[in-house]
């Protein structure tokens, strides 16, 4: 009788431990919506939570929108109050899947992957696909992803007065070092 109880418990413990996720709370997201010939419009948030389930390739990320810092305080104020409305929409969330991911295949050389998932920003959700470079050194996994979104897809307003200074296409880069 003891064997009947112990075997399922032992199996269950292996399953639980194999589902261990790796996390960082210091991933960096940089966004840029600059138009050539005008002052750069770029912000960085270095306090982003990023989670990877190495067994499944599932990823999730959470960024507090007020965490973005800009070169000029006025840009940061406009970003928070006029565009992102951070009091109403305080965070950006991404949940997705790294296609063909197998942690055993990672080496110190970057490998190219595609991440597909759902990005929620400014109260709107949209399916996105992004390229990523992933490497592994010991217990450290590094992920770098670059992609673009359209501000209009997330109902982020760009006033007509400054439309020529601010691009609708927002370039986003994520760097996550997970341990």
Image (cartoon, helix red, strand yellow):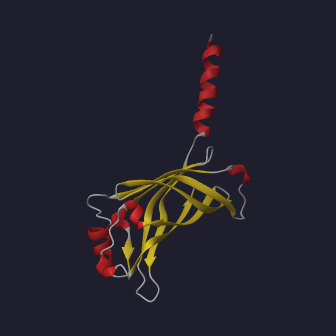
Toward the top, the furthest residue is 1
In-front residue for pair 95/164: 164
- Whether residue 3 is situated above or below residue 64 in the rendered picture: above
Q: Is residue 173 left or right of residue 168?
A: right
Quarter containing the C terminus: bottom right
Q: Is residue 122 left or right of residue 127?
A: left
Choose top left, top right, bottom left or bottom right for residue 112. bottom right
Q: Is residue 73 visible?
A: no
Choose top left, top right, bottom left or bottom right for residue 144. bottom right
- Whether residue 69 is situated above or below residue 101 in the rendered picture: below
Toward the bottom, the furthest residue is 37
Toward the front, the furthest residue is 160
Q: Residue at x 72, y 50 (%)?
A: 104
Q: Is residue 80 visible?
A: yes
Quarter containing the N terminus: top right
Choose top left, top right, bottom left or bottom right for residue 6. top right
Q: Residue at x 43, y 83 (%)?
A: 40
Q: Position of residue 151 (x, y in %)?
A: 40, 66
Q: Residue at x 57, y 35 (%)?
A: 16
Q: Position of residue 46 (x, y in %)?
A: 44, 67
The mark tally for this picture is 0
- Whether residue 70 is situated above or below residue 2 in the rendered picture: below
Q: Is residue 111 left or right of residue 87?
A: right
Q: Position of residue 156 (x, y in %)?
A: 35, 65
């Amino acid at each position: 009788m003891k064997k009947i109880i112990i075997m399922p418990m032992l199996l269950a413990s292996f399953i639980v431990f194999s589902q261990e996720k790796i996390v960082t709370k210091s991933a960096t997201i940089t966004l840029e919506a600059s138009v050539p010939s005008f002052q750069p419009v770029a912000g960085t948030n270095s306090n982003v939570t990023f989670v990877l389930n190495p067994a499944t390739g599932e990823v999730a990320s959470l960024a507090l929108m007020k965490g973005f810092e800009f070169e000029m305080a006025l840009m940061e104020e406009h970003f928070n109050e006029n565009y992102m409305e951070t009091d109403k929409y305080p965070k950006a969330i991404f949940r997705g899947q790294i296609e063909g991911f197998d942690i055993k295949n990672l080496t110190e050389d970057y490998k190219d992957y595609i991440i597909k998932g759902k990005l929620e920003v400014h109260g709107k959700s949209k399916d996105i696909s992004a390229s990523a470079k992933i490497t592994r050194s010991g217990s450290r996994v590094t992920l770098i992803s670059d992609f673009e979104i359209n501000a209009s897809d997330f109902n982020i307003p760009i006033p007509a007065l400054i439309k020529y200074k601010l691009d609708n296409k927002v370039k986003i880069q994520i760097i996550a070092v997970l341990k």
